[in-house]
Image (cartoon, grey):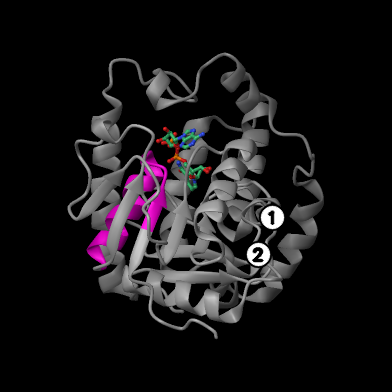
């Protein structure tokens, strides 16, 4: 018989940056939440109402969200473990950023009960979550998961095809690919790109989105501009060398003290806390100005 009972128990597998945020949002939504960690004693600052576990619980949770390191073999090992422990009882979702969902679902062995649940960092702050189906995912599983996500005060952004990068990262990487190319070829510096994002494109997108804004501005100008500009965009399929070089040199951003910007002398915790506080303020104001996301 098809199980249509509401999801009540949630296990978050992985206690890093994303796992904690995801667990917090489900706990605030009134779910019974546990978090699976290889070292639960280290988790001294867990969100209220979240229990840390070192082993899988005896009873199958209704929903398990995997959010461990982005490494195929580690994720596949975890899914095989979940399958051995619970069979097809739980709905299993992966927060992978880019690994192929069909390969992850195959390791669980029950693709009809598998979805992608992709959060944006900070996971407890943003009002939308990507919810991605495989061709095999059952409609009931999709809808039960969507209802649970809505109870965490987030709107699921349902995608019925699992394309690499899903929707959010595809858009983000398309613009970043062009931005890095403009920096690499000396058109502008990184500060100019960030100022365009912060003061021009970002605010406009907040009010009228990406595509609706083009309707408002008029499609004639937009269609003619596309003809003139698109042929000159960077269409290279290689990851940008500036970024790859920074990574190879260990200049991995805020935590390393150096990335595109110089972060030396700054406490990463303070910088992240400040950014999250500002994001919270902005999202609250946006909600009052343009409303929340529509399902
Ligand atoms: N950070 C982001 O902005 C972001 C956004 C969306 C999705 N994601 C995805 O979320 C997942 C987790 O990312 P994160 O940023 O929280 O990483 P993180 O490094 O903060 O946390 C990863 C956690 O996985 C644990 N871990 C590592 N190997 C493991 C194993 N073999 N078995 C069990 N646990 C293991 C680590 O101890 C750590 O607690 C990744 O798949 C990532 O791609 C990250």
Circle number at residue 111? 2
- Please rate how many residues cluster around mark 2, counting C-alpha atoms within 10 Å: few if below 14, some from 14 to 19, many from 20: many
Q: Does the residue at mark 1 contact the one at mark 2 (Cβ under 8 Å)? A: yes
Of the pair 154 and 68, the residue shown nearer to us? 68
Q: Identify whether 283 is placed above or below 288.
A: above
Question: Does the magenta run of residues contain 87?
Answer: no
Query: Seen in the image, is 48 located left or right of residue 93?
Result: left
Q: Mark 1, residues whose alpha carbon is within 10 Å: few (<14), some, or many (≥20)?
A: some
Is residue 97 visible in the rendered image? The answer is no
**Horizontal and vertical percent position of residue 198:** 41, 47
Asked whether mark 2 lies closer than 8 Å to ligand 1, one says no
Residue 197 bears which disc, if any? none
Pointer 1: what residue? 106
Q: Position of residue 93 (x, y in %)?
A: 52, 59
- The answer to if 21 sits in the magenta stretch is yes
Left or right of 108? Residue 252 is: left
Question: Viewer-proximal residue, 140 or 225?
Answer: 140
In percent of the image, x 40 and y 69: which residue is there?
A: 149
User: Which of 35 and 109 lies nearest the eye of the viewer?
Assistant: 109
Instruction: State the image quarter where residue 28 is shown.
Output: bottom left
Q: Nearer the viewer, residue 166 or 177?
A: 166
**Image position, residue 74 (x, y; %):** 58, 37
**Measured along the vertical axis of the image, is residue 153 above or below residue 143?**
above
In terms of secondary structure, what is the magenta stretch mainly?
helix
Separation of marks 1 and 2 at Cα, in angstroms: 7 Å
**Magenta residues, start to end:** 11-29
Quarter of the image for residue 275 reads top left
Q: Earlier in the sequence, mark 1 or mark 2?
A: 1
């Amino acid at each position: 018989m098809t199980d249509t009972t509401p999801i009540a128990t949630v296990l978050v597998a992985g206690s890093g940056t994303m796992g904690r945020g995801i667990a917090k949002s489900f706990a605030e939504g009134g779910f019974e939440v546990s978090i699976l960690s290889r070292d639960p004693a280290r988790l001294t600052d867990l969100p209220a109402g979240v229990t840390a576990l070192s082993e899988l619980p005896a009873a199958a949770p209704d929903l398990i969200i995997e959010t461990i390191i982005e490494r195929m073999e580690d994720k596949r090992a975890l899914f095989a473990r979940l399958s051995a422990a619970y069979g097809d009882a739980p709905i299993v979702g992966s927060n992978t950023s880019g690994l192929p969902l069909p390969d992850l679902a195959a390791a669980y062995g029950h693709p009809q009960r598998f979805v992608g649940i992709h959060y944006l960092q900070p996971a407890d702050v943003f009002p939308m979550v990507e919810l991605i189906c495989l061709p095999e995912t059952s409609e009931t599983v999709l809808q039960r998961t969507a209802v649970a996500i809505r109870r965490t005060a987030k709107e699921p952004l349902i995608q019925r095809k699992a394309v690499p990068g899903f929707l959010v990262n595809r858009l983000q990487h398309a613009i970043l690919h062009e931005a890095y190319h403009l920096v690499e070829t000396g058109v502008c510096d990184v500060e100019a790109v960030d100022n365009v994002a912060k003061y021009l494109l970002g605010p406009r997108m907040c009010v009228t989105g990406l595509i609706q804004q083009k309707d408002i501005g008029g499609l004639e100008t937009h269609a003619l501009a596309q003809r003139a500009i698109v042929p000159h965009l960077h269409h290279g399929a290689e990851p940008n060398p500036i970024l790859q070089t920074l990574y190879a040199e260990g200049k991995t951003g805020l935590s390393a003290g150096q990335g595109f910007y110089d972060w030396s002398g700054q406490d990463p915790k303070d910088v992240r806390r400040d950014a999250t506080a500002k994001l919270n303020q902005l999202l609250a104001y946006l909600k009052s100005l343009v409303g929340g996301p529509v399902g």
